[in-house]
Image (spheres, helix red, strand yellow):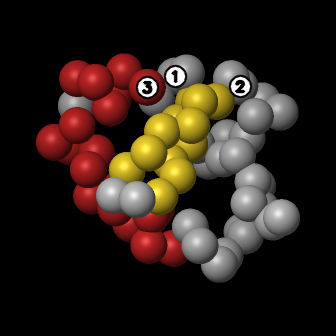
C-alpha cells in the first residue's frame, strides 16, 4: 500500500493536521480540517484542483 493521506489542496499529511477521507468520482480524496471549508463554501473554485489531484493522485508520490 503506497497511498498516503495527503490533503489534495495544501499537501499536508496526517502527521501534521487532521485529515478526513472523502469520496469523489469513484476515488478517494483526502481533505484536511483547514481545507474542508473550501469544499463546503468554495467548491466551484476548488473543483479543478480536486479533479487534478484525482488524476495524478494514483501513481505519483512527490513527498512533502
Ligand atoms: Zn489542506
Q: Where is residue 41 shown, x and y percent of the image?
A: 23, 23
Instruction: Describe residue 42's horizontal placement relative to residue 62 as left or right.
Output: left
Q: Name the residue under label 1.
A: 34
Q: Where is 24 relative to 13, above or below?
A: below
Q: Tell me the residue that label 3 is attached to.
A: 36
Tell me the residue that label 2 is attached to.
17
Badge 1 residue CB within 8 Å of ligand 1: yes
Disc 1 vs disc 2: Cβ atoms closer than 8 Å?
yes
Any atom of ligand 1 within 8 Å of the CB at mark 2? yes
Which element is circle 3 on?
Answer: helix
Q: Is residue 22 above or below residue 34?
A: below
Whether residue 4 is visible here, answered yes or no, is: yes
Which residue is rendered at x = 40% and y = 59% of the image? Answer: 26
Q: Which residue is drawn at 48% across and 39% down?
A: 22
x and y percentages locating residue 7 in the rendered image: 58, 43
Q: Cβ–Cβ below 8 Å for labels 1 and 3?
A: yes
- What SS does tag 1 mark? loop
Q: How far apart are marks 1 and 2 (CA)?
A: 8 Å
Q: Residues within 10 Å of mark 3 (few under 14, many from 20)?
A: some
Left or right: residue 22 versus residue 45 is: right
Residue at point 74% right, 60% down? 3
Q: Earlier in the sequence, mark 1 or mark 2?
A: 2
Question: Residue 64, percent across and down?
Answer: 76, 55
Tell me which numbered mark, 2 or 3, is placed earlier along the sequence: 2
Q: Is residue 4 left or right of residue 22?
A: right
Neighbor class of circle 2 (other Cα within 10 Å; few <14, some 14-19, many 20+) is some
Quick check: 62 above or below 30?
Answer: below
Assess mark 3: CB under 8 A from ligand 1? yes
Against 25, residue 14 (above or below) is: above
Amino acid at each position: 500500500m503506497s497511498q498516503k493521506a495527503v490533503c489534495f489542496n495544501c499537501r499536508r499529511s496526517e502527521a501534521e493536521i487532521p485529515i478526513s477521507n472523502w469520496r469523489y468520482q469513484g476515488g478517494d480524496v483526502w481533505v484536511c480540517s483547514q481545507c474542508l471549508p473550501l469544499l463546503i463554501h468554495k467548491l466551484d473554485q476548488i473543483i479543478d484542483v480536486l479533479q487534478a489531484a484525482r488524476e495524478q493522485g494514483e501513481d505519483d508520490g512527490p513527498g512533502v
